[in-house]
Image: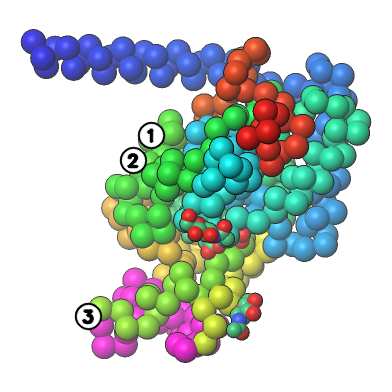
Amino acid sequence: MARVRTWLQILALVAALRYSSVQVEAQLMVGFYRTRNCLYAEAIVRQTVTAAINDDPSVAASLIRMLFHDCFVEGCDASILLDASPQNPVPEKDAVPNVSIRGFEVIDAAKAALEKTCPSTVSCADIIALAARDAVELSGGQSFNMPTGRLDGTVSSADSAASSLPSPLSSTIELTQMFLEQGLSQDEMITLSGAHTIGSTTCKQIMSRIYGFDGTKTGVDPNIDFDYALYLRRLCPEDGNTSRSVPLDSVSPNKFDNMYYMNGITGRVLFPSDTTLFEDGQTQFASKLNSQNEDLWEVKFANAMVHMSSIKVKTAWPDQRGEVRLNCRVTNAGK
Ligand code: HEM
Ligand SMILES: *[C@@H]1O[C@H](CO)[C@@H](O)[C@H](O)[C@H]1NC(C)=O
Ligand SMILES: CC(=O)N[C@H]1CO[C@H](CO)[C@@H](O)[C@@H]1O
C-alpha cells in the first residue's frame, strides 16, 4: 500500500512538472518587449554588452557563466544579482561556487540605460539572458534568438546555490544528475560544458592536479596531458601566487569555438568535471562528436542555452514572487 502511494506521488509530481514546464515555455517569447512598447530593449542590452567586451574581453565569459548560475539556483530570476541585506545577509552571490562571478556592473549599466528608455519594463532576469546570448555571439559563437518575458524573483540564498551548482570535482553521474534535476539532458550537459572554451580560472583551482597528485611519480594527474601539465606549472609555480589566472582554453582563450572538445580529447582541460566527459563511457562519444563537428555543436549549444534559460522562470502577473526590479541589486520591497 505504501509503495503504491509512493508511486502515485511520483506520477503526480511528474505530471505537475510536465504541466508547469509547458506553461512556462508558452509564456516566454522572442521579442516580448516589442509587445510592451520597448522596441529597443534588446538593442540597448546589446550596445552595453558590446561596449563592456570591447573594454575587457574577459567580461564575455563572466556573463555566460552568470546565466548558468542564475538559472540553476531558484530558476532564471536574477536572484544571483541581489546584494546582501539585513533581511538576507547571505545571498546567492556570496555562495562558495559564486566567488568569482563578475560582470555585475554590465548588468547595472544595461538596466540604467533601459530604465531611461522604458521605465519599469525590462526585468533583470531578461537582461542576464540577453547579455549571455550577446556574449556568445560577440566572442565568435552562433547568433540565436533568446525568448524573453521573465520576471525577477524576490528570494536569494547562498545555501541553495551551494546545493544546486555542480562542483568542478563532480563525476559524470553527478553532473548528469544535477542537470537532470533542472530538466536538462545529459547531452545538454555535455553541450553546455563547451562554454569552457572561453574564460579563466585561478591557479588555486588546479594546483592539486599538477603538484603532489596522489599515487603518481610525477605528481601530475595522469588524466592530464603531461606537456599541458608542464605548461600549467609554468603559469602556476608551486609556491607562486595562486590567484593568478589560467585560461580554460589555452589554444583560443577568447574565442567561442569548439576548441574545448578538441582540448578534451587530448587531455587538455582543467577541471575533473571536464576530464570526466572525455573519459567516461557514457559521455565520451558525444564529446568526441562535438570536437569533430563544430557547426552541429554551435546549434546544439544555442538550443541548450535557450532551454537552460527557461528553467523555472516566473512569468505570471501578478505574482508576489515575481516583479520587474528597478535596481537589479535589490528587490522592490528593498530586501
Ligand atoms: C558542468 C558543470 C560545470 C562545472 C562543474 C563548472 C565549473 C566551473 C569552474 C570551477 C569555473 C572556474 C571559476 C573560477 O575559478 O573563477 C568555471 C568557469 C566558467 N564556466 Fe563553468 N562549470 C560548469 C558548467 C558550465 C556551464 C553550463 C556554463 C555556461 C553555459 C559554464 C560557463 C563557464 C564560463 C564561461 C567560465 C569562465 C568564467 C570567467 O572567465 O569568468 N560552465 N566553471
Ligand atoms: C596575486 O595575483 C593577483 C592577481 O594577479 C593580484 O591581484 C594580487 O595582488 C597578487 N598577490 C600578491 C601577494 O602578489
Ligand atoms: C568575494 C566573495 O563574495 N566571497 C565570499 C564567498 O563566499 C564565502 C562563504 O559564503 C564568503 O565568506 C566570502 O566572503
Residue 137 part of the magenta segment: no
Q: Amino acid at mark 2?
A: Gln
Q: Which residue is mark 1?
A: 181
Label 3 close to label 1 by CB (< 8 Å): no
Residue for point 81% across, 16% down: 35
Q: Position of residue 259 (x, y in %)?
A: 56, 62
Q: Which residue is mark 2?
A: 177
Label 2 close to label 1 by CB (< 8 Å): yes
For the record, the magenta segment spans: 215-239
Q: Which mark is residue 215?
A: 3
Label 3 close to label 2 by CB (< 8 Å): no
Q: CA distance from mark 2 to mark 1?
A: 6 Å
Q: Which mark is residue 118?
A: none
Residue 228 part of the magenta segment: yes
| Label 3 packing within 10 angstroms: few (<14), some (14-19), many (20+) | few
Q: Position of residue 150 (x, y in %)?
A: 65, 26
Q: Secondary structure at mark 1?
A: helix
- Give left or right: position of 156 versus 14: right
The quarter of the picture where the N terminus appears is top left
Outermost residue toward the front in this view:
86
Q: Position of residue 100 (x, y in %)?
A: 57, 60
